[in-house]
Amino acid sequence: MNRVLLTAAVVSLAFLQIGCRSKQERLVEDQIDLGEDLLDIMKGITDEASAKAAVPELEKLKKQAEELAKEGMEVMKDLTPEEAIELMKKYEDEMSKLDKELKAERKRIMANEQLKEILADKLPD
C-alpha cells in the first residue's frame, strides 16, 4: 500500500488541481478528506494492538484512493492549463500542510520497530 496510496493520491491530486469546476473541486476535497482520514488513523497507532487494528482501515483507504485516482483521471480530461493552475493554487496550502503531517506520522511510526514490522507495506511513503 505504501507507494500505491501515495502515488494514487499524488497523481490524482496533481490532475485534480487542474481546474476549478465543481466536480473537480469535489474530487480534490474528497482526496484531502481521504488524506485526513489516513492521518487520523496514523495518529491512533501507538502500539502493536492499534497497529494491527489499523490494517483493515488502511486497506480500505487504499481502495478508496485508487477509486478516486481513477475517477480523477476521467474528470480532469476537459480542463485547461489555466483551470489547472487555479485549482492548484486554491488547495496548495491545505495539501502541503496535510502532506507534512502525513510524513511526520509515518516517520514516527517507522521509528518504532514493532510498528514498522506490522505497517511497513501499509503506509504511503
Image: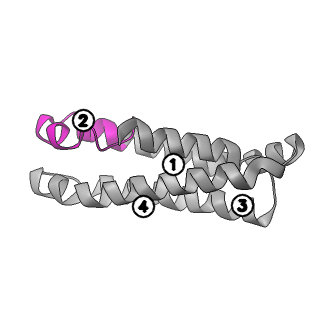
Identify the residue at horizontal 24%, vertical 35% (top origin). 110
Give SS at disc 3: helix
Q: CA distance from mark 2 to mark 1?
A: 18 Å
User: What range of the chain is rendered magenta?
Assistant: 105-125
Q: CA distance from mark 4 to mark 3?
A: 18 Å
Say the numbered circle drawn on residue 37: 4
Residue 112 horizontal side relative to residue 123, left or right: left
- Sequence-first tag of 3 and 2: 3
- Sequence-first tag of 3 and 1: 3
Residue 95 horizontal side relative to residue 16, left or right: left
Q: CA distance from mark 3 to mark 1?
A: 17 Å
Q: State the residue position of label 2.
A: 110
- Determine crowd level at label 2: few under 14, some 14-19, many 20+ residues with C-alpha closer than 10 A: some
Give SS at disc 4: helix
**Figure quadrant of the C terminus:** top left
Q: State the residue position of label 3.
A: 25
> Three-letter amino acid code at disc 2?
Met
